[in-house]
Amino acid sequence: MSNLTINADRLIRRIEELGSLGRDAQGRLVRVAASDMDRLGRDRLVSWLKEAGLEVAVDRIGNIFGIWRDNANTDLAPVMLGSHIDTVIDAGIYDGCYGVLAGLEAIESLKEAGFAPARPLVVAAFTNEEGVRYSPDMMGSLVYAGGVGIEDALAAVGTDGTVLGKELERIGYAGQHQPGFLKPHVYVELHVEQGPVLEREGIAIGAVENLQGISWQRITIDGEANHAGTTPMAMRRDAGVAAARVISFIADRASASRARTVATVGTIAFEPNAINVIPARAIFTIDLRDPNEASLKAEEAALAAFLDELAASAGVTVQAESLARFEPVTFDARVVALIEAGAKAAGLSCRRMTSGAGHDAQMIARIAPSAMIFVPSRGGISHNPAEFTAAGELIAGANILLGVTAGLAVD
């Protein structure tokens, strides 16, 4: 089995085919969770799982599993591979999908080669990883790991007013299995980096050893609407200016920090949103991330103190609502070392690294040893149709996953 490789043509063809499904009239890839577009991708994935001779199972949150049991000891916990196939709006074709299809390819290649795993192998496609339509993101894996109750998750109301549970029923993916019905022995997720580090350093493989903590908040600032021309600057309660001060504060603080904090305001809306009216309300989101829990807590505390000071100095009221909070994750050292060893054996350069993005692996790490493999992303671009990783890099990553999977399957 030392010379075993994946079927490269099959993997690339499937990535491209899945990337063609779920496009709108403008040609944008919009396979958001539990939508009609998502159903197209799910149906195709299930057809490939069945073609590979895998048992297909769907749980109540819509997570899809392709299971290879055969002669394995079914009393042993399975090796699980996977990621997600839902996308953002106007997405690229690799984010998430590569991990699912490479996981399928690894299992299928082992199966075709006559490999005899000691324990079952499973590839998973988790629901609503992106969190575009329903909140929170990484929902399917979070529910699977027991972080959110299934009933609460199914009752989630989307940005379009739909209810997740009803939408899963409508598209035919409200499964019968309870989330967590298969507890992994280990979980490995292969992913495009979505950042510039590997490409910039000319490194082929990233052995992801940890993942940043994430703090999402929605900030609402209430001031007073008034005439833009007749109200003196000193007499204004301008929610828009107050919002700008918050944005500058978090950006300046993150830029000056010696920690690895990053801070982003990704959405903002003013009311009444008129060119000649002082904003009465500003609503915006803040995304804080840091791989160190103490540093992340310090940033949250600094923001809270600044908001209190701003309310007093600007004559506005400020409300902060937590949308999501995930602690940093340290991945399993043994699996990370296996990834490094696999890269070395293949003659590929490798470095340990931190994931700046959230992934299903951080949720599954709550219930099983987990780790991730990264391959380069051209220009560090993701969540964008320009997202690209060369075929050779995709194949190299999938072969590392194959080798790691084979080693874990006989453990």
Image: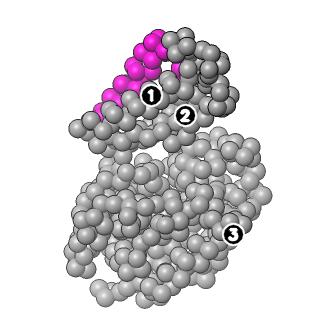
Q: How many marks?
A: 3
Can you identify the residue that label 1 sits on?
246
What secondary structure is found at the residue carrying circle 3?
helix
**Residue 332: percent from left, percent from top:** 31, 55
Magenta segment boundaries in residue numbering: 294-320
Can you identify the residue that label 2 sits on?
284
**Which residue is depicted at the point 54% across and 48% down?**
137
Residue 398 lies in quadrant? bottom left
**Which residue is depicted at the point 27% across and 35% down?**
256
229 and 320: which one is in front?
229
What secondary structure is found at the residue carrying circle 2?
strand
Residue 44 lies in quadrant? bottom right
Going from N to C along the chain, the mark reached first, 2 or 3, is 3
Residue 297 included in the magenta stretch of the image: yes
Going from N to C along the chain, the mark reached first, 1 or 2, is 1
Disc number for residue 40: 3
**Which residue is depicted at the point 57% across and 49% down?**
131
**Residue 246: percent from left, percent from top:** 44, 28
Q: Are marks 2 and 3 in contact (CB under 8 Å)?
A: no
